[in-house]
Structures are given as structure tokens and as C-alpha cells.
């Protein structure tokens, strides 16, 4: 099957946060929400589920989903996990907020790398924790890298876990294996648990390979909660279905217990879409406010038809040229 990623789809009257936050004269490229239709197998699976007409509670997850996801981790990253380690949750943001409540108590600390995605910045406040920040180092060419010394120096006695974002939002880095190994070594030495937001793991450029930090070593995996989702990969964010991978059985039990009656189950249509996307969506996939350190930058999402991106870039160029001082 072929897909047309240049097709313009009007989303202004579809309750879209992306397209309704600003006025009609604005081309919105600010949020990680693609303007492409989701894979046809996903749409077909949703249509079949909707035509069934009954939308009761999702109380039993098919074992095939857990095996399907575990097989995907092995194929893409060489990371072998038991299907039992896979836990379905409604979202990555609820996932790291639940994880924080498992790992820390009021007054404890969480360390993160800035600039970073706003919900990660907000997480400490949500949980009554202190926020320790380690700035990513900015190179002369504008790219960023991990400053392990700054990271280690930012850890306090009260720090309980590291909230990692990799691939990093918003700087766009896919951290190298050696960078992750050094971060993990510090966490092991300081007895920190790692909560890894890896939601963009399947959107890396050709030539770059994502490494789940928990895949580095069994000892690291025992201290890690990894969060992934089909939402960014297959444009399914509105369907609210994500995955936590927790290989440590005791930690997994604590996580599951903490989410009871808060974020206990996923949306039945989100589950249907996720299953179809991971099972049949790969051909589609094979088409081609952030805290300290984020001052002076904006995030630009170019997951849109080329015509939309071209017009947006033309507008940006015109605005910059208009505001540039005249030469003397």
C-alpha cells in the first residue's frame, strides 16, 4: 500500500488542539501532532470495532498484544523482555507521574535534564517533589550533548529518581549508547531509579539508532521504568494508549498498585488502534515552554504536508527579514 503524505487535510473543525489554539491566519507547527492520516490498517481496525457497536469496559488484554510488543522491542533494539513486563497505561505523562509517586515521597527530589518538555518540568510540582536540573551542554554548532559532570553534581541526598527524556524533547537528540552508559552508571552509584520517557523512540533519522536505557544491562533494567507509545509513531495521540516496560517484578507490582482507580485501564479504541498499528502499521511508518536552556528557541513540528511547511517557512523568513535592521 502507498500513502500520500502531501495530501492536505482540513483539521480546523475537528476539535484539534493544534489547529484551534491560534487564529485562522496562523499555521500551527508548535505541537508534536502530525497532519497525516494514521495507517490504513489502524483506521480499518477502528472502523470494525466501532461497527460492532458495543463499547464496554476493557477488562482483559489479549496476551497477543504483550507478545507482539515484546517481539517489537527485540527486533528494533535487541532488547529481550518478558511479555509480563509490558503494562498498558493511558499515556506516557500519566505514566511518569504514577512512577514518581511510587518512587518518592513529598520533599524528595527528581533530577531531569533541561531544556525539556513542559509536562516533565511540571512533574515535580505535581508530586510535591523538589526539582534538580542538569543543563544539557550546547556545542558551538548548536547541537546538545549530555554533560555527565553537571548531571552528577546536580544530584542531592534527597534525589530519588532520574526522569530521562530520550530521544530528547525539544532538543531532538538521540543519546548515544556511551552517553546513556555514563548516566546509568551515575544513577547506579547514587542508588537512583530511572524513569525513561522514550515516546519518540521510533522517530529517529536514518543512521541514528535509539537505545532504550534499560537495555544496556540487567542491573540497569532492574532500576528502570520505560515508557513508550504508538501515539507519536503512528499519529494516535488522541486515543490514549501507551506502554510501560518494567522488568523488575516487585517494582512492576508497586507501579500497578499505584495506578489503581487513577489510570487503571486504557481506552478500548486506543487499545484497538495500538494493536493494529504495531501489528500492521510498519509500512506507513517506513514513509519518511521548555525550562532553562530553552530561551530564544521555538519548537517546530514538520510532520505536515510539504506545502504547509513551505508556506510556514516562507512566513518565518518574511517575518525575520521585516524585523532585520537596515544596513548602514
Image (cartoon, grey):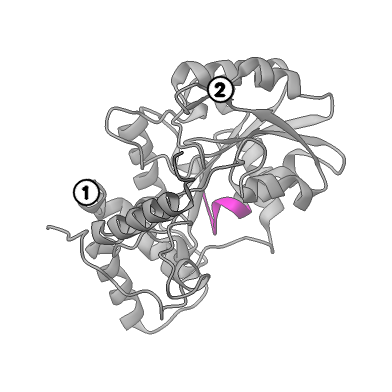
> Mark 1 Cα within 10 Å, few/some/many (few <14, many 20+)?
few
Q: In which quarter of the image is residue 100?
A: top right
Of pointers 1 and 2, the one earlier in the residue sequence: 2
The residue under label 1 is: 287
> Is residue 96 visible to us here?
yes
Q: In which quarter of the image is residue 133?
A: top right
Q: How far from the left and from the top, in percent, is residue 81?
A: 44, 33
The residue under label 2 is: 146
SS for dot 2:
loop
> Mark 2 Cα within 10 Å, few/some/many (few <14, many 20+)?
many
What's the residue at 22%, 46% (across, down)?
A: 286
Q: Nearer the viewer, residue 219 or 8?
A: 8
In the image, residue 136 sits, relative to residue 126, either above or below, namely: above
What's the residue at 42%, 69% (across, down)?
A: 269
In the image, residue 100 sits, relative to residue 91, either above or below, namely: above
Q: Which of 322 and 240 is in front in this view?
A: 322
What's the residue at 49%, 78% (across, down)?
A: 56
Viewer-nearest of discs 1 and 2: 2
- Magenta-drawn segment: 87-94
Amino acid at each position: 500500500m502507498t500513502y500520500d503524505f502531501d495530501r492536505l487535510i482540513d483539521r480546523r473543525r475537528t476539535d484539534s488542539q493544534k489547529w484551534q489554539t491560534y487564529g485562522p491566519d496562523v499555521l500551527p507547527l508548535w505541537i508534536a501532532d502530525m497532519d497525516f492520516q494514521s495507517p490504513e490498517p489502524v483506521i480499518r481496525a477502528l472502523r470494525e470495532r466501532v461497527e460492532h457497536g458495543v463499547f464496554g469496559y476493557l477488562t482483559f488484554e489479549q496476551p497477543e498484544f504483550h507478545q507482539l510488543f515484546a517481539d517489537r522491542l527485540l527486533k528494533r533494539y535487541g532488547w529481550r523482555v518478558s511479555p509480563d513486563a509490558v503494562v498498558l497505561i493511558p499515556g506516557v505523562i500519566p505514566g511518569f507521574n504514577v512512577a514518581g509517586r511510587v518512587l518518592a515521597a513529598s520533599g524528595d527530589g527528581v533530577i531531569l535534564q533541561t531544556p525539556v518538555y513542559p509536562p516533565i518540568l511540571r512533574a515535580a510540582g505535581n508530586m510535591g517533589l523538589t526539582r534538580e536540573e542538569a543543563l544539557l551542554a550546547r556545542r558551538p554548532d548548536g547541537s546538545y550533548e549530555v554533560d555527565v559532570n553537571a548531571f552528577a553534581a546536580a544530584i542531592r541526598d534527597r534525589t530519588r529518581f532520574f526522569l530521562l527524556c530520550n530521544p530528547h524533547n525539544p532538543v531532538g537528540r538521540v543519546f548515544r549508547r556511551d552517553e546513556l552508559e555514563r548516566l546509568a552508571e551515575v544513577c547506579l552509584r547514587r542508588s537512583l531509579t530511572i524513569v525513561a520517557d522514550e515516546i519518540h523512540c521510533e522517530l529517529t533519522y536514518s543512521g541514528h539508532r535509539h537505545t532504550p536505557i534499560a537495555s544496556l544491562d540487567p542491573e540497569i533494567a532492574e532500576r528502570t521504568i520505560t515508557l513508550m507509545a504508538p501515539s507519536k509513531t503512528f499519529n494516535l495521540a488522541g486515543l490514549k494508549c501507551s506502554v510501560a516496560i518494567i522488568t523488575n517484578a516487585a517494582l512492576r507490582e508497586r507501579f500497578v498498585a499505584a495506578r489503581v482507580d487513577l489510570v487503571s485501564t486504557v481506552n478500548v479504541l486506543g487499545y484497538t488502534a495500538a494493536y493494529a498499528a504495531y501489528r500492521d502499521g510498519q509500512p506507513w511508518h517506513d514513509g519518511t515552554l521548555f525550562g532553562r536552556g530553552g530561551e530564544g528557541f521555538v519548537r517546530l513540528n514538520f510532520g505536515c504536508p510539504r506545502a504547509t511547511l513551505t508556506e510556514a517557512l516562507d512566513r518565518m523568513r518574511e517575518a525575520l527579514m521585516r524585523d532585520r535592521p537596515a544596513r548602514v
